[in-house]
Structures are given as structure tokens and as C-alpha cells.
Image: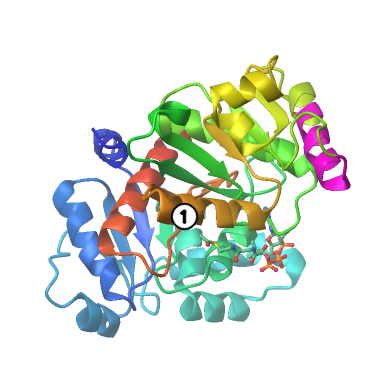
Amino acid sequence: MAFIDTIKARAKADKKTIVLPESMDKRTFEAAEKIIKEDIANVVIIGTPEEIAKNGAGYDISKATIIDPFNDPNKQKYIDKFVELRAKKGVTPEDAQAQMEKDYMYYACLMCKCGDADGAVSGACHSTGNTIRPALQLLKTKPGISSVSGFFLMEVPNCTLGENGMFVFADCAVNTDVDSEKLAEIAKLSAESFEALAGKDAKVAMLSYSTKGSAKHDDVTKVAEAVRIAKEKFPDLVVDGELQLDAALIPEVASLKAPDSDVAGKANTLVFPSLEAGNIGYKLVQRLANAGAYGPVLQGLSMPVNDLSRGCVADDIVGTVAITAVQAQMQG
Ligand code: ACO
């Protein structure tokens, strides 16, 4: 069974409520119809009657819950929660209302925060920054986590490397500046994400252009230090580095470059040293190897919120909703 089909089956087994705030985009309605038909999740769409009529015409969304952000009996509850959460930033009730009416992702995050939904998916017509900023501001990180990061679950066809072609790549989406502490945390979160979604033990490679001291530079030291921190903070984590990509993946190269490593040659979770490397790396594999790239999936948030590519099709939204629902199940 393809990865995404196993995730859909898991989502169906314990249905969660996922908000789709992009009623200004027809793909939202096409996806909502499929999600309801496949019984993957309960769907909430945020939109005015005009937006629903204009963009939802022709799609059967009769079983979705429609929330009109201008006429919602729960709206005052969300305004109050927004003000409570952002009091230190000087947000007034008027500011909160205006923000929620202008940007429905704020509305979606407040529904999650107030327990009226389990997660949200957006980004078909909003940038990554605009999609995740409301979640960072309102939902915040899980206890003990300092940074949210974004990974891709990669499914490489006809590949025996990693977990039969399955990998987590991180951080490919969020953190523009990563130091050793952040990389160590990304390693831990990525291992948990791999195990939650792929159902196999994670083996984490901290990637570099150097293997075990073969090159000297501050960039290399940053990754080597991240490995030291990760091993110290998370003694059960199977992690090693710094490793070049070939040493991380290919047993023959690993036996030459890192013969004593318990990760080299068998890594299934790849932590990139920078956002540039991660973002370029996943797109290379997606485009040149024709790999499935599910994400960016956010990890480290207190509740699951996920981004979409603006080039997505309705099936990508369906898949991301299923992943979000499974993340919600894992969070209890
Ligand atoms: N984890 C947790 N909280 C964070 C993080 C993070 N990684 N980054 C920012 N925050 C918090 C801040 O502490 C702040 O909280 P506060 O308002 O309570 O003080 C809040 O989020 C807003 O932070 P800002 O720095 O003001 O927000 P900004 O919009 O400048 O940056 C963002 C956050 C959007 C994540 C930014 O780092 C960004 O744009 N990253 C790159 C996204 C991107 O373009 N990715 C590549 C494309 S994705 C793709 O190709 C699939």
C-alpha cells in the first residue's frame, strides 16, 4: 500500500476535525468533497456565503461545517482568546476581530486553540510565512520545544535506500537561521515524525559536506556540535554526523568513510545543515527522482497545522489533511 493510503486508513480509524480556511480557492472545495467522500476527516470550511457560493459551486460539501467569519455565534469566544494570547503584544479586541476577518488562518488557529477543531491546513493560495505565522503566534510550540520546523516525508520510487525509499528530510521549510542547538532539536523532532508516520525506527544523519572531520570549517563544526548535543540530550536517539550524503545513505561509502557509525549507510532521517540545503535538497529528489514529497509538515507545534504548496492539486490537500489528522491522533 502506498504511504499516503496507509495514512488515510489511519485517519479514518479515529476521525478528527480539520479546518480549511481557504474558501477563496476552488481547490479547497474539490478537496473537501473528496475528504468527506473518503471519510478521512470532519471538514470545517471558513468563508462567507458569497465565497462559498462562488468557489464551492458544483462540489458536494453538504456534510462540511461552514463557518461564516462575519456571522458566527462563537466569534466573541475567539476574539477573547486572541486578546488573551496576544495581550503582551498589545492586541485589542478590535485588532483581533479585524485580523480574523482579514486572514481566516487566524480564525482557524483560534478554533483549534478553543478545542473546536483538531488541526488546520492552508497554503494553496498563501505563502509559507503567511500560513504558519498565525500558528506560531497563537498555538505556539509544544512544551519543552523551542522551534517549529518543517519536514517532507519523501517516497522515492524503486529505491532500497532509507526505509525502502522512505525518508524524512528536515528542516526544508521554516528556520532561516539554525545553530547547533536548533539542529539537535530538529534531529529529535524529525526522528519522532519519521517513527509516527513511517512506523519504523529512525536513524538520523546530520548532513554536511564533511564526514567525521574530513573538512574543517565553522559550518562543519556547527553540525558536529549538533551531534554532540543531540547525543547528550537525547541518549535514546540513533543519530550520527557530521556525514556527507553518500556516507549517510550508501553502505559501501559508509564502510570507507564512517566504518564505526551506527547510522552511516542506513540513514532514513536526513537533517540538513541549513534551510537552503533542505529546501533545495527535497526539490532535487522530488523532481529528478520523481519522488513523492509530502509536506512541508510542521513539527513542534502544540497542535497540528500544515502548509501546502501553492502549486498543489486537490489530492495534495486531501493527503495533507490525512497527515494532519494522524498528527492530531498522536497528540491525543
Ligand atoms: N518556531 C517557533 N516560533 C517561531 C519560529 C519558529 N521556528 N519562528 C518565529 N517564531 C515566533 C516568534 O517567536 C514570534 O512569536 P511572538 O510574536 O509571540 O513574539 C512569532 O513566531 C512571529 O515571529 P516573527 O519572527 O515576527 O515572524 P516572521 O514572520 O518574521 O518569521 C517565519 C516567521 C514565517 C517562519 C519566517 O521564519 C519565514 O518566513 N521562514 C521561511 C519560510 C519560507 O519561506 N520557507 C521556504 C518555502 S517552503 C517550501 O518551499 C515548501
Check disc 1 and report the residue beneath it.
Answer: 306
Mark 1 is surrounded, within 10 Å at the Cα level, by few (under 14), some (14 to 19) or many (20 or more) other residues, namely: many
- Depth order, front residue of 96/135: 135
Q: Quadrant of ligand 1?
A: bottom right
- Image position, residue 10 (x, y; %): 29, 34
- Image position, residue 8 (x, y; %): 27, 40
Q: Residue furthest top?
A: 260
Work out whether 139 lies above or below 250: below
Q: Please provide the residue range marked out in magenta.
A: 216-228
- Three-letter amino acid code at the position of disc 1: Asn
Q: Main secondary structure of the magenta part?
A: helix
Identify the residue at image location x=32%, y=57%: 316
- Image position, residue 178 (x, y; %): 75, 50
Image quadrant containing the N terminus: top left
Mark 1 within 8 Å of ligand 1, using the beta carbon: no
- Depth order, front residue of 145/226: 226
The quadrant where residue 44 appears: bottom left
- Depth order, front residue of 276/288: 288
Identify the residue at image location x=54%, y=28%: 250
Secondary structure of the residue carrying numbered label 1: strand
